[in-house]
Amino acid sequence: MQINTPVIWLVKYVFTSLIFFNALFCNTDPKLLAKLQPYVVSIKSRSIVAAYGDVSPSAGTGFIVDAKNGYVFSNAHVAAGNKVIAEYLATLSSGKEIPLKLIYSDPTADIAVFQGDLKDLGLTEDLPLSCDPIQVGTNVLIIGKNENRHFSTQTGVVANPNEIEGHLPQHAMRISLNMQGGGSGSMVYDISSGKVIGIIFASNMATSAFAVPIAYGVDILEALKANKEPKRFSLGAIITYCSLDDLVKYYSFPEDSAGEYAKKYPESFHRALKVHSIMPDSPAEEILEAGDCILEINGQELGPNLYKLDKIVNDLGAANKKAELLVIRYGKKMKLSIPPYNMNDRQVKRMVVFGGATFFEADDVMIRRSGLKGKNRVLITNARLGSGFIEKLPMFPGSNHALICVEKLGDRDIFTLDDVIKAIPSLIKSGHFTIAFRNYGIKIGYDEKIIFNQGRLLEEINVFEQDGGAEEFSFDNKVHAWSVNRLAG
């Protein structure tokens, strides 16, 4: 049998390619892995009380960025942020376990900083961190608890350094990489430069992973080393990418400007920063509009770089200065002035557990999910199984989760957690009361259709002695720990 020339050429090409990629990705230097492994930790947590999210054990990865001060980088979602009361343990490369304390959880970027006693590890230098622009095709490796197995290694390639992902979207890079559960918080190590360029935070569980540029973490680390609380300021705009073609077609973006932009920023993949939506009760409300294309901030061009926008807004907020934006809105260039606000002020710092339900004041994540605005800020998203609240509130199907805004308990108006605390003694004394609320979640009706209902609803709640007493939990920024105050019962 004779094989034609094109087929022979194709076989040779595939065979050569396999050899090349095998050498590139599989033949990782053992000395490099041995050098990096002592910096990697596996993190497991056990949560006790949660404003939102699950109360359950979880696992992830972290890596040591400052051995002297004991700082470990990981993800905010591994730590569950300031919305969960939890304890954390790290497994070191030696197999030894040490306790960790959550020092900082970023409100926007999926980054958390833990602290532990790392003095006995013998690390003489810290990992180099690079804030340089990231190139398409950069060869990287990660070491972490991939597939929930300690110190698993994967190699990959940066497919796109300019993505926007997350609950309150952050700048991200997309990596061609097989990352599974447990790998969140792994370092992204640039093999060529020998520096860490990002932190893994998500994946599609098959071919792609997403990482936060390490630049976000460097900003946090600089503040911590200066004995300052890291700040995260925002304008209140949720940013996304929009293709230049769609900007021209739907938003009257000037064609000549689109052409100039594409030439100036070839790494943009023909996309620019566009306002997707506006956070309720934020400085951007009634100034920015969905669809605005942001070109400059305080005279600096942005291109596709969301991190640059975040960085400048942060610096302006810390200096108590306004952001001066140049935007294009339906073909018209406009200059807009907006004062940033401190997102840390709206993080969950207090929780009240009463009758099996957890009450808290909405943070930015919950405000974005619900569209909540106005004076009523108290939410319930978690209720214990068997409690009077879970029996009457519209929970998500098959779960103990809801998303409701509490407006009244009995005859008392509820605007803050202090209002809840004041109402509790009389509610416990009677043992039964009404709750007025608005449902920002979903409820499955008898006809199995999804129903959205944000009208005011009223239900009757019974509280039993078995539900336990009421407790107030408060977070102390100075000692980075939660304290508990027993209120009644």
Image (spheres, rainbow, N blue to C red):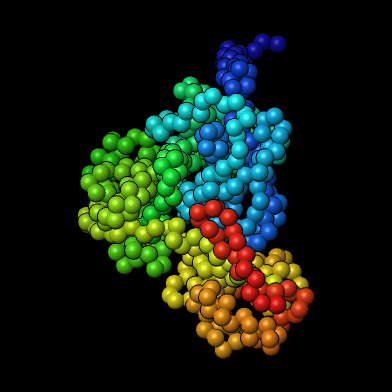
Q: Position of residue 388 (x, y in %)?
A: 72, 78
| Residue situated furthest top in the rendering | 2
Q: Residue at x 41, y 67 (%)?
A: 280
Asked whether 215 or 154 is in front, the reply is 215
Is residue 376 placed above or below 123 in the rendered structure? below
Asked whether 485 or 28 is in front, the reply is 485
Q: Residue at x 48, y 48 (%)?
A: 109
- Classify residue 143 by image quadrant: top right
Is residue 177 placed above or below 273 in the rendered structure? above
Q: Position of residue 111 (x, y in %)?
A: 51, 45
For the N terminus, the quadrant is top right
Q: Residue at x 49, y 31 (%)?
A: 196
Asked whether 177 or 280 is in front, the reply is 280
Residue 148 is left or right of residue 218, and the answer is: right
Q: Position of residue 281 (x, y in %)?
A: 39, 68
For the C terminus, the quadrant is bottom right
Q: Position of residue 78 (x, y in %)?
A: 60, 47
Q: Residue at x 65, y 47 (%)?
A: 88
Is residue 134 placed above or below 30 in the rendered structure? below
